[in-house]
Amino acid sequence: MRCILGTKKSMTQIFREDGTVVPVTRVQAGPCVVTQVKTAKRDGVSAVQVGFGSQKAFRLTKPLKGHLKDIDAVRHMRDFRAPEDHGLSRGDSFTVSIFSAGDRVQVEGVSKGKGFQGVVKRHKFHGSPASHGHKDQLRMPGSIGSADPARVFKGTRMGGHMGDQQVTVKNLEIVAIDEENNELLVKGAVPGARGGLLMISTEDGKMEVSQALEVPEVAEETKEEMGVEAVEEPKKDVVTEDADVAPEAPTA
């Protein structure tokens, strides 16, 4: 399993070695960091939460600050389903280098919102005839059924809100990778507008990540070699009671 978060930049075209023109979408992907690892036993699902994008720390709420403790503030966080033996841990970071040219991936994003649209644009209705007797009826939906039920059946194709939905496009090819600029060139179009967040993943292969660094405890011998002086704790006065010793008489 390999996954990454990115933002859609623009579309362009590149030439293959045989001269074929390939339309591609430029995706600014990574670097990303693992912000949480979910297990089926504790969370009910085996998944990896990935963070992407820079964010100013003072904009985070207190719960998010605790959630991202010891991790740089990120702007986006999304969950990816992962097998239990994925081998990732909190704090691991990775870039577009986890992919290679020719990989087949699925891209998930939010499609462009088009507002309220009629049936011709939303459901591809061909409209009414444009001859005599059809004034102002060219793009009308027409009858929606008998008047006897006195209601609209569920699923009836009518005008309404169009777009702004979660869309997944599968089997897209990664044509090229620009590791210097953290860009993926994906063949064809991907859902969403420019600047929209994209979730790119594939079930094949394993991720090569930079493991989170753990700060080891420094031993006393190492401290002496480094010239660090040990701070001795102040000794407390120990009072012993002895029945044979008489208390000293108070002085005037």
Image (cartoon, grey):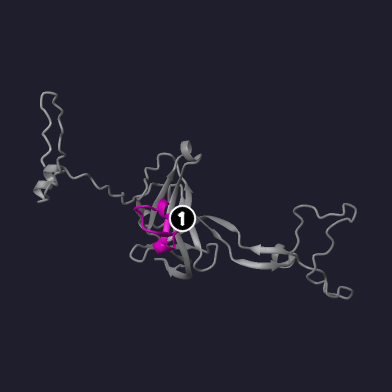
Say which amino acid is labelled 1: Met
Q: Which residue is drawn at 11% across and 28% down?
A: 246
The image position of residue 202, as x and y in percent, is 46, 50
Q: What stretch is highlighted in magenta?
A: 51-75
Residue furthest to the front: 252
Q: Residue at x 47, y 36 (%)?
A: 41
Q: In this view, does 136 lie to the left or right of 47?
A: right
Which residue position holds label 1? 77
Q: Is residue 166 left or right of residue 70?
A: right
Along the viewing direction, whichever of 81 and 231 lies nearer the viewer: 231
* Crowd tier of the residue under label 1, counting other residues whose Cα lies within 10 Å: few below 14, some 14–19, many 20 or above: some
The image position of residue 86, as x and y in percent, is 40, 43
Q: Which residue is drawn at 88% across and 55% down?
A: 146
Along the viewing direction, whichever of 164 and 121 lies nearer the viewer: 164
Q: Which residue is drawn at 59% across and 66% down?
A: 112
Q: In which quarter of the image is the C terminus?
A: top left
Any part of residue 194 in sight: yes
The secondary structure type at the circle numbered 1 is strand
Q: Is residue 144 left or right of residue 34?
A: right
Quarter-of-image position of residue 20: bottom left
The image position of residue 32, as x and y in percent, is 39, 56
Q: In this view, does 185 lie to the left or right of 247?
A: right
Along the viewing direction, whichever of 103 and 53 lies nearer the viewer: 53
Can residue 88 be found in the magenta stretch?
no
The image position of residue 38, as x and y in percent, is 45, 43
